[in-house]
Amino acid sequence: MDERELIARVRAGDGAAERALYDAHVDRVYRLAYRLAGDDELAREFTQDTFVRAFERLDSFRGEARLSTWLHAITTSVVLNGLRKVKRFRHRETDLAEATEVSRGRRQAEPDLKRRLAGAIDALPHGYRTVFVMHDVEGYTHEEIGAALGIETGTSKAQLSRARAKLREALADFAGEWVS
Amino acid sequence: MSLDQSDQNDQGDREDRFEQRLRDMAQEYHRPPETPREELWQRIAAARAARRRRRAVSASPWLRWGVGIAAVLVLGIGIGRWTARQPGGNAIPLATAGGNDQGMLAYRVAAAQYLTRTEALLTGFRSEARSGQPDAQFARQARDLLGTTRLMLDSPAAQDARLKGLLEDLELVLAQIAQLPANGNQEDLQLINQGLEQRGVLLRLRTANPAGPGPVRMQGAL
């Protein structure tokens, strides 16, 4: 069954088609929600909200983009708004320079590069973090990211580049390990 | 090849190696577990059913009556508890069942709204507690909800044994959060979180009221 037919059947109230649509997309939605939220319960809530909204608004889907693109736009909107609501960004929106100083100060106490990388990603401004996670971690293309976040493809590329630069700066004292 | 070109090539190689290594290592960042497909599908189905029911009810003038009656009944329970207090004596629960479907609907609506607020508070609190010191607003909201919890325990909504057990656990957890000092240490937070986990409070809340954040829900135990 192609995507157009599947959507038509969901719109007609076909429960099996609803399940098929869910099965086709739930993994990527949940994975993205989890990567951005870093919390299983929040990821479940965001995935639930994404599909509830998607099924409710499917009539407004005009088919100009792929269904997955439309669904990921809903996902990112649900996740980013949800994260703002639970104020999880409070600790992430730390000024990166400060975060870098703090993390450098812990070089002796916390030598684990992976943990340092996770902390540095958390400390990225949330726009950079979202693009970085979507592109470098989850493998979305810049076109998909642009469509999902409502930004130009060039903006997505620029934000990724800045995110990588900030990560490089934050992990500068691990430079030897990076290239080894 | 000139030295400049050679330097540029080295620089480019290093950039490429850095980006590749970054991508590889970033795979560990918030690595998701396997998707809980069936559980998520059940939650989505329950949430959609609750929304459909809510829309159906909201289209009916009975809902407006129900919500109004709910507010009046909750207020009535509060007044009843207040006026029943004797000097030096304990409060005597005066709340009685509505005695008809409309009254029960009103209680259910009130209970659903209360459970939604409590779920939001506990989810936010747990999340904040993991990342540091929760805001003082959690204690204020917990105090507010604690009063409602006690009203709910005296209302017909607590005739359901499952809901009553949940309300009793919520009363305990909310009391702990309400009493949390502004500079509460990690041990206090850990104790509250352990209580939440061990009694499965959030899971039971969501089972009782499974539609996710929303103003009115009537599923599960309700």
Image (spheres, coloured by chain):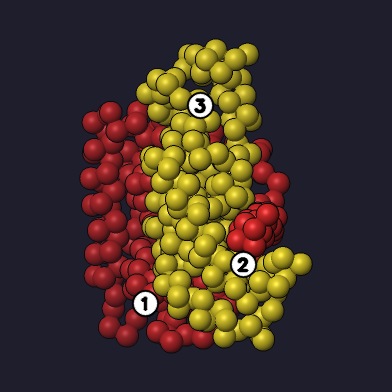
Q: Secondary structure beneath disc 1?
A: helix
Residue A117, disc? 2
CA–CA distance in space, label 1 to label 2: 31 Å
Q: Amino acid at mark 2?
A: Leu
Chain identifier for the red-coloured part of the image: B
Quadrant where the N terminus of chain A is found in the figure: top right
Mark 1 surroundings: few (<14), some (14-19) or many (≥20) residues within 10 A: some
At x 56%, y 52%, the residue is A133
At x 40%, y 32%, the residue is B53
Q: Amino acid at mark 3?
A: Leu
Mark 3 touching mark 2, by CB under 8 A? no
Image colour for chain A is: yellow
Q: Nearer the viewer, mark 3 or mark 2?
A: 2
Mark positioned earlier in the residue sequence (3 or 2)? 3
Please state the total of marks drawn on the protein image: 3
- The residue beneath circle 1 is B136
Q: Nearer the viewer, mark 1 or mark 2?
A: 2
* Residue B118 appearing in the image: no
Mark 1 touching mark 2, by CB under 8 A? no
Mark 2 surroundings: few (<14), some (14-19) or many (≥20) residues within 10 A: many
Q: Which chain does tag 1 point to?
A: B
Up-down: is A147 above or below A132? above
- The residue beneath circle 3 is A67
Residue closest to the eye, A69 or A42: A69
